[in-house]
Image (cartoon, rainbow, N blue to C red):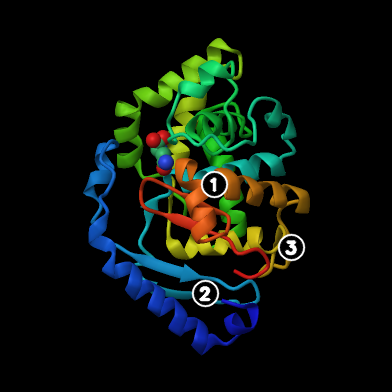
Amino acid sequence: MSKERLQDRAALEATVRRAYEAGRRALGSGAVANYIPALANASPGWFGLVVHPVDATEPVAVGDSDLAFSLQSVSKIFSLACLLNDDDHVVFERVGVEPSGDAFHSIVRLEEERGIPRNPLINAGAIVVSGRLKGATVDEKIAHFQGFLRGICTEGAFGVDEDVYLSEWKTGFRNRSLANYMRHWETLEDPMLYCETYIRQCAIEGTARGLARLGLVLANGGVDPIQQRRVLDGRDTRTLLAVMLTCGLYDEVGRIAVDVGVPAKSGVSGGLHAVVPGVC
Ligand code: GLN
């Protein structure tokens, strides 16, 4: 959809509604994740869609757009944003920016590449990012991250879903393995601090409306068009969009780039956050 059409509110609403109906027809073709047991409690019928143009104060929202769900891997792009905003660019000495082509929780390349995750959006890379958030403890790091989110999306709660957190904490052996393995290579210091922060970060709740609000900053070169203040450095915003485009959907990233062609980030709770730079 062109920028001109986006400014035509009625045309935008009609387009979003059509996309929503098309998405709803496809709902039965998927399944909710259950390797984190609490995620299996989600209804496969929940579906919301929100589009927020950069030059509008209100988004167009349809369906379950105000339903809170744990953000899971959609949170990864914002924890990286928070870290870069705190000027931790040294993180890129510990995490690469190349697509992996592997599943999100894969460990194979970590052995080949001596404990340096390929990118910040696979689990291994995101564990490194989360553990480096400001703060001495898990709670301090998470509170700092929540403050970053709430500073942009002032109406968002971004609390932790404790059931989802505990459920992943009890079963997250694979993420613990990644953290321990990276400790062996000295990519990180305290594997349990990093891993616990990561799992809590994934359990932070948001809504489709809130995600669209956060995405405005990414779509608008780092400047929040609503509060009219710069939130992220322009260069960092470019970096974030580049890693979304090249790494945001793991082993499906090429397919989505060909079919859709915009930077996006997925999560196992079903969220999909996409940015059309300069547009929405
Ligand atoms: N917390 C989830 C995990 O580490 C996030 C994965 C995802 O959303 N792709 O398994």
Residue 147 vs residue 106, the one in the foreground? 106
In the image: residue 235, left or right of residue 61: right
Report the disc number at residue 90.
none
**Residue carrying label 1:** 146
Q: Is residue 143 visible?
A: yes
Which residue occupies 59% across, 50% down? 245
| Amino acid marked by disc 1 | Gln
Q: Quadrant of ligand 1?
A: top left
Residue named by callout 2 = 59
Q: Do the residues labelled 2 and 3 touch (CB within 8 Å)?
A: no
The residue at the point 59 percent across, 73 percent down is 53
Corner quadrant of residue 133: top right
Q: Verify CB contact (< 8 Å) between mark 1 and mark 2.
A: no
Please state which of residues 32 and 188 is positioned toward the viewer in this rendering: 32
* CA neighbours of label 1 inside 10 A, class few (<14), some (14 to 19), many (20+): many
250 left or right, relative to 186: left
In this rendering, which labeled residue sits more in front, label 1 or label 2? 2
Kind of residue sitting beneath label 3 = Arg
**Looking at the image, is 131 positioned above or below residue 36?**
above
Q: Residues under labels 2 and 3: Cα distance?
A: 19 Å
* Residue 272: quadrant of the picture: bottom left
Q: Mark 3 points at which residue?
A: 229
Q: Position of residue 20 (x, y in %)?
A: 37, 72
Residue 148 percent location from the top left of the image:
61, 49
